[in-house]
Image: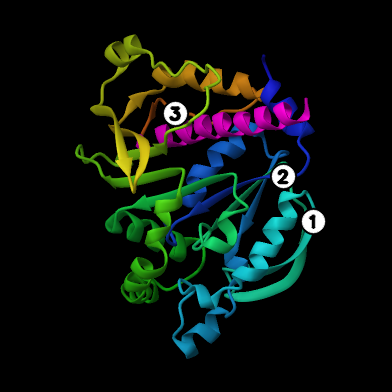
Amino acid sequence: MLGEFRKRLEEYQGSLIIGVAGDSGSGKSTFTKSISNLLGRDMVSFFSLDDYHTEDRETRKKTGHLPLDPKMNDLKLAAEHIRELRSGKAVIKPVYNHKTGKFDPPEVFEPKKIVIVEGLHTLYDELRKYLDLKIYVDPSREIKWAWKIKRDVEKRGYDEGDVWTEIRKREPYYKRYIDFQKIYADVVIQIDQSKFRFEDSYLVEVLMKSLDFPLSGIDLRLSLSSLINSSQRPMAMAYRDDYYYEKRVSRISFDGFIPREAIEELEKRIMEYTGFVENYIIERSNYVNGTQIAQLLVAWYFVEMMNNIFREIESTST
């Protein structure tokens, strides 16, 4: 029924928590934006674990510590806050200001129906048990570094030389403290260099843990006629069942560009199903790339998992 999902979400007692983990500059916010677009800003709030760093930028320069080390983050407090948010309660949380590198005064955080938790350690044991959907974003080192430099220099005011110094220093910390979290994810998004070498083109592979419940019936077909008649750019798609760290997964890969009209019907069906049809899941353009296709798949997977939660609640209440 049109809009049944949104109605169920509005009636849900508490908040649903989506956890997104990955290295700094890996593009975590890109993939959660699609869920915000899908449901509307009135339903989604963003919660950054960066606010739970225990040292500011100046102190880190003196101590040599990096925030990738979980001991340099108050994960216990973060877990307490996420538990409260899950029940729909507001919390008073710390605030780390990336522009100044200092801590601002604490603020009250009011959860909306969906809370998206982003950070370096989101899938750690302390936090993972409170998450309804777990996502790990895993770009190649070259892509991750390019994105991090662009973000830290242009948006956070860092010196480019300092960013490169930090990148070299943080790599062993990343492998030790961050990378392993992907074994716990429901969705892993791998991003690599495109074989076609076009600007803004990426080889993206989405690994989605196989769902053990009936699906809602959203039609995931693409328009083959649009692909054949409209496409003037190279593209490649592949699908296969696989195992990833002992979990059965669906592995969908995409490279190049696909005409927008080829996925418009799919996007429309997902939006109509959720009852929010005033926006678009991914940005408007004549062509969409692999990261945008991944956003669409994440939005669909989220809808399916949340529907199952609603079904379980309804079955226990009858």
Residue at 44% across / 19% down in the picture?
220
Q: CA distance from mark 2 to mark 3?
A: 33 Å
Q: Which mark is residue 15?
A: 2
Q: CA distance from mark 3 to mark 1?
A: 38 Å
Q: CA distance from mark 1 to mark 2?
A: 11 Å
The amino acid pointed to by label 1 is Ala
Q: Which mark is residue 90?
A: 1
Residue at 59% across / 35% down in the picture?
37
Residue at 48% across / 89% down in the picture?
63
Which corner quadrant holds the N terminus? top right
Q: Quadrant of residue 40?
A: top right
Q: Secondary structure at mark 3?
A: loop
Mark 3 vs mark 1, foreground winner is: 1
Q: Is 151 one of the magenta-colored residues?
A: no
Can you say whether 26 is above or below 255 in the image? below
Q: Is residue 95 left or right of residue 250?
A: right
Which corner quadrant holds the C terminus? top right
The amino acid pointed to by label 3 is Ser
Q: Secondary structure at mark 1?
A: loop
The first of marks 3 and 1 along the sequence is: 1
Q: Which mark is residue 285?
A: 3
- CA neighbours of label 2 inside 10 A, class few (<14), some (14 to 19), many (20+): many
Which range is magenta?
A: 290-318
- Residue 19 percent across, percent down from the top left: 55, 51
Q: Are marks 3 and 1 in contact (CB under 8 Å)?
A: no
Q: Between residue 247 and residue 195, name the one nearer to us.
A: 247
The first of marks 2 and 3 along the sequence is: 2
Q: Are marks 2 and 3 in contact (CB under 8 Å)?
A: no
The amino acid pointed to by label 2 is Ser
Q: Quadrant of residue 253?
A: top left
Q: Is 310 one of the magenta-colored residues?
A: yes
- Residue 223 percent across, percent down from the top left: 38, 13
